[in-house]
Structures are given as structure tokens and as C-alpha cells.
Image (cartoon, grey):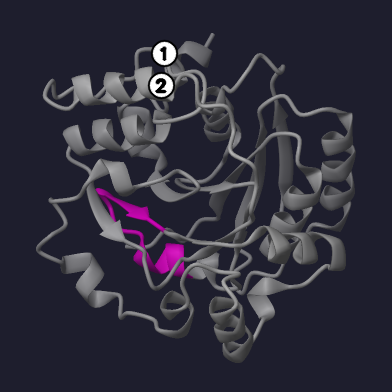
Amino acid sequence: MPPARPLSLVITTYDRPDALAAVVRACFMQDDKNFEIIIADDGSAANTAACIERLARASPVPLRHVWQPDQGFRAAMARNRGILAARGDYIVFLDGDCIPQRDFIARHRALARPGRLVSGSRILMSEALTRRVLDDGIDVAAASALTHLHWRMGGHINKVAQLLVRWPDIGRRSGGNARRFNWRRIKSCNLAVWRSDLERVNGFDESFTGWGYEDSDLVLRLFHAGVLRTDGAFATEVFHLWHREAGRDRAGSNRQEVLARVETGITQAVKGLRDHVS
């Protein structure tokens, strides 16, 4: 059954307070406000902390800031700290540059089932539209279907059908393809997992540093532990603000590590949640 207790929304961020503010303000506008926000900060500077303080004062839901020193890209550790700070039984992960629609929390709650993760998807935005959203305060989640079509025709978003059509939930929950999912296509920028399942696999593996594949590794280990996938497409889409690509010097080695784990059946993070317990 869907969790009745408040969900925990863990938002990962690093030194982009304008994007974070747009994302969090969209979270304030959720139809379902039975959730908390944990901002998992991978070492941002003081301007992000100041931004979060302002947001916390205006927040209609509990909001907490979890920070760690900037020692390079350590998203796995930031998310683990967010999990440990969370009070909910069900964790929804969102990146600090992904703006949710109004029913994002409600749809994730409706799709939640024991033994399942929910993989959402994203709609990529152009640099020009991103700049307008951040500079002019355009509320993309409130835009009309006509506006979405206009953006798609102008090349400012990469897809539109997912904004215009909603699939029924029944087929997602009982679909025969639940056991056959590709870990390569599931990203932690829009992902929901039961806390008990995260604890069972020791959370994200902090031995992954540098950009990339720490989320693929988590999903692979969850699959090895028996957790199945519910597809959140056409229900939980988020608007992904444009940004320059991060340095990817570790991406190749991280990917090779995940590939090496595919056949092993590994479930446990080498360094994860339990390493934070004193």
C-alpha cells in the first residue's frame, strides 16, 4: 500500500542556488503536502546556505539542510546523509536542477508498492528557456499544454507527450515486465525507494567518487536484492534545467566498476549508510 506517513524528498545540490530555489519553490506548490524536504548539499558555498535559510522560513513543510565539505563530486555520500536525516519510510530522490510538476509527490505516493522502486523520467530544457525560468521566474509546472507544445516546436524541451498524456497506474503495478529492467536507464534525479530497501543494500556506495554511475550501481544492487521496478514515465516527469556538463574524468572507471558487478549478484555498498553509524 502507498505510505500514509510523510514522504521524505531528498534534493541533491551543489553551488547552484538559483536552480535550487526554483526547484524547492515548485515543491512548496505540491498538491500533496504530506512530505518533508531534505536538501543534501555536496559542499556548496555560503550563498547556497543563505538561499536555503530563506526557503526554510517560507516552507509549508519541514525543510532541513544537510551539508558536507567540498572534496570533489561525492553525490553518493550526500544522498546517504540525506537518507540518514530523513524521517519518512519512503524516500524520493530529486536533483536540485529538476523542477517537479504539481502532482509529483502525489503520483510517487500513488505508485509506491512494497518491494518496488519507482523510476521517474525528465524533460530536458534548452539553455534559453532555462535562463528565462531562472531570470524571469517562469513557473514551468503551471504552463499550459499549448505553451508546452510551443516550447517543443521551438526546440526548448525535448519531449511533450509525457506532459499531455497520463498512463493509468494499474498496469504499472502489475506489469509482467517488472522484473526486466535496464539499470542503465534509471537515474537518481527522479527515483523513489523504500527506506528499508535502501538500508538492506547499505545505501549508495561512497566508493564511487567523481561524476557518474553511483545511481546505476544502487539500482543494480537493489535489483540483485529482489527489488523490482515500477515505471514512473507519463506520471512523474520533471523539468531538467540546462547546465554545462560536469567533469567526467571518473565516468569510464565508474562504469566499468558497475559492469563488473552485474554478474556478481552483489547487494551491499562497499562504503555506505552503515559507515555513518557510530
Secondary element at tag 1:
loop
Q: Is residue 265 above or below residue 55?
A: above
Q: Quadrant of the N terminus?
A: bottom left
Characterize the local packing of mark 1: few (<14), some (14-19) or many (20 or more) Cα atoms within 10 angstroms: some
Q: Residues within 10 Å of mark 2 (few under 14, many from 20)?
A: many
* Magenta-colored stretch includes residue 108: yes
**Residue of label 2:** 205
**Mark 1 highlights which residue?**
271
Residue 246: quarter of image: top right
Q: Which of 255 and 266 is in front in this view?
A: 255
Q: Are marks 1 and 2 in contact (CB under 8 Å)?
A: yes
* Disc 1/disc 2 C-alpha distance (Å): 5 Å
Identified by mark 1, the residue type is Lys
Residue at 27 percent across and 59 percent down: it is 230
* Amino acid identity at mark 2: Asp
Question: Against 185, is 42 above or below?
Answer: above
The image position of residue 53, as x and y in percent, is 87, 42
> Between residues 12 and 19, which one lies in front from this camera angle?
19
| Rendered view: 165 above or below 36 | below
For the magenta stretch, what is the residue range? Answer: 107-120
Q: Which of marks 1 and 2 is nearer the N terminus?
A: 2
